[in-house]
């Protein structure tokens, strides 16, 4: 039997449930703690009733001019289905980061908010097509969610391969961060963030507003006319490496007593924390990005805390309804501020932010006037780094293209993942794409559960960092458009490749 280092035994969580279906030689899942079992039984009924019955019933009772047609009933079914799946994620004995965040997004952005819009009869963005397109959009989201569940179910039936000790020694082990490369990432993070701060004129601008940040980036000259690639790279390299370096350093402190006793490691962590407070604060960044930063840090700092995982999912619903619509207070300067007063808690759901379902319907109407793009939009997102000066016919954001077709001035509109698949490949693409996403999410969740157990690869596990980061970034990917989301995602992947090795060295294991 492979021996476990003493430091790993000291720091390993005592009540971690190994991943299901981990394959031959995997330890049997442990029974959940008795206290949590009692708590689960006590919370299960009111939680399910609240998410599946109470909140939809309260929304349905709201006054409004909405018509109770097929779109209404489909939206009600979608809301209840997503609520039931979210409750399952919260009450599960295993932490499923990516799946839990997915269902939290679907419940709020594709369930509760559009249902309130259908009941009240008002949408954040006008719907220019026929009512039938909204029915089609709602039905496709519902079918896509079922396909996501099917993909996740297939992933759960496939056993995970167990990494053996000899495989690790020959370079076939799990992905871990090479110590020297990790130091290089820390240096890159400090240098890139420092350049970002200096280029924009100092730290003060990062505590003003997002509007001023965008204007400063434009004035800096990094973005060529008609292209935002330069600005995207400046923002991406100024923020993403700093976040990843902080996450790696945080995991090392959490899992290694030796690291916590090292003054140099603690000082580096403090320095990275200060840098992130400047470049990744909620004032100068989009709410979805700050949400990514927050969730990634929480899940990295407390990887084995079931209570934290369930608290994030449960309170996320309340935060999305009450806090999130008003969290863009610092998006504009004082004179451009929008009023934060509302007569009803559901009014922000029909006047701000949550335009995902109606934009899906508008995208269906847009495609009906032309044809599917057969991979062109997705190719533009994958090749986001190619300047338009080189690729003159490079596709624009899907949300932008639909907004231009609608004749809107403000085209910073969402294009949820279902929309991206539909625009390129229609219903078949939407169903198949969501099934693949569900399969990948479930496999990643199971690998992550394996990585944070005492049998995992230890403090240097790349997956223990990547999974929380992807979980937080899921909000951005699901909201879309993908072209806007691709930049930081690619920079994050590049940084992870920089530090990753598949040969777990003895020096790293002793940490």
Image (spheres, helix red, strand yellow):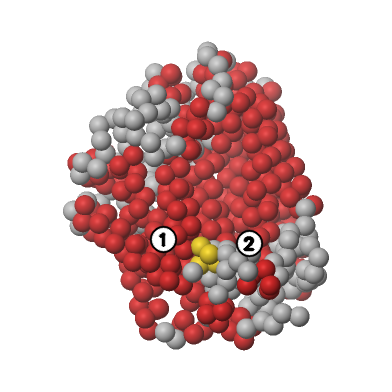
334 horizontally vs 271: left or right: left
Looking at the image, residue 208 lies above or below residue 135: below
Residue 427: x, y in percent? 66, 26
In which image quadrant can residue 406 be found? top left
187 horizontally vs 84: left or right: left
Looking at the image, residue 45 lies above or below residue 416: below
Residue 463: x, y in percent? 57, 61
Q: Residue furthest front?
A: 170
Residue 452: x, y in percent? 62, 69
Closer to us: 197 or 5: 5
Which residue is disc 1 drawn over?
243
From this viewpoint, is residue 216 visible? yes
Q: Residue furthest top?
A: 369
Is the residue marked by circle 1 packed among few (<14), some (14-19), or many (20+) residues within 10 Å?
Answer: many
17 horizontally vs 121: left or right: right
413 horizontally vs 141: left or right: left
Residue at image position (50%, 29%) is 377
| Res. 448 mark | 2
In which image quadrant can residue 389 be found? top left
Residue 435: x, y in percent? 69, 40
Dot 2 or dot 1: first in sequence order is: 1
Closer to us: 364 or 164: 164
Looking at the image, residue 235 lies above or below residue 163: above
Local secondary structure at mark 2: helix
Question: Considering the image in quadrants, where does the N terminus appear?
Answer: bottom right
């Amino acid at each position: 039997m492979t021996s476990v280092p003493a430091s790993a035994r000291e720091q390993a969580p005592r009540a971690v449930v190994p991943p299901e279906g981990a394959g031959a030689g995997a330890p049997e899942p442990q029974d959940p703690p008795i206290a949590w079992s009692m708590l689960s039984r006590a919370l299960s009924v009111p939680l399910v009733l609240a998410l599946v019955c109470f909140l939809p019933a309260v929304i349905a009772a709201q006054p409004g001019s909405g018509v109770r047609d097929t779109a209404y009933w489909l939206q009600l079914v979608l809301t209840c289905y997503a609520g039931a799946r979210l409750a399952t994620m919260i009450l599960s004995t295993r932490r499923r980061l990516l799946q839990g965040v997915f269902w939290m997004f679907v419940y709020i952005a594709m369930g509760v908010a559009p249902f309130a819009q259908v009941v009240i009869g008002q949408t954040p963005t006008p719907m220019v097509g026929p009512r039938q397109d909204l029915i089609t959009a709602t039905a496709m989201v519902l079918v896509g969610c079922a396909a996501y569940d099917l993909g996740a179910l297939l992933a759960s039936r496939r056993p995970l391969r167990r990494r053996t000790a000899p495989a690790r020694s020959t370079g076939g082990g799990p992905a871990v961060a090479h110590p020297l490369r990790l130091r290089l990432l820390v240096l890159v993070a400090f240098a890139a963030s420092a350049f970002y701060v200096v280029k924009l004129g100092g730290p003060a601008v990062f505590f003003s507003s997002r509007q001023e940040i965008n204007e400063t980036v434009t004035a800096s000259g990094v973005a060529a006319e008609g292209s935002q690639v330069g600005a995207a790279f400046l923002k991406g390299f100024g923020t993403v490496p700093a976040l990843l370096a902080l996450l790696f350093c945080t995991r090392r402190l959490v899992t290694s007593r030796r690291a916590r006793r090292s003054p140099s490691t603690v000082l580096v962590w403090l320095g990275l924390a200060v840098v992130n407070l400047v470049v990744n604060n909620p004032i100068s960044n989009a709410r979805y990005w700050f949400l990514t930063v927050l969730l990634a840090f929480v899940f990295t700092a407390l990887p084995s805390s079931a209570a934290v995982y369930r608290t994030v999912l449960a309170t996320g619903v309340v935060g999305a309804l009450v806090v999130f619509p008003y969290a863009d207070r610092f998006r504009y300067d004082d004179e451009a501020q929008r009023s934060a007063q509302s007569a009803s808690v559901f009014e922000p759901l029909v006047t701000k932010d949550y335009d995902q379902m109606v934009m899906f319907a508008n995208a269906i109407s847009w495609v009906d006037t032309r044809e599917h793009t057969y991979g062109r939009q997705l190719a533009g997102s994958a090749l986001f780094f190619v300047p338009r000066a080189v690729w003159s016919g490079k596709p624009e954001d899907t949300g932008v293209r639909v907004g231009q077709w609608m004749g809107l001035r403000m085209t910073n509109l969402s294009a949820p993942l279902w929309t991206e698949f539909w625009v390129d490949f229609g219903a078949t693409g939407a169903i198949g794409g969501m099934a693949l996403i569900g399969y990948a999410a479930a496999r990643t969740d199971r690998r992550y559960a394996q990585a944070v157990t005492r049998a995992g690869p230890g403090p240097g596990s790349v997956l223990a960092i990547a999974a929380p980061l992807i979980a937080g970034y899921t909000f951005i990917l699901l909201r879309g458009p993908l072209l806007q989301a691709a930049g930081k995602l690619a920079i994050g992947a590049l940084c992870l490749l920089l530090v990753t090795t598949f040969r777990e060295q003895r020096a790293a294991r002793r940490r």
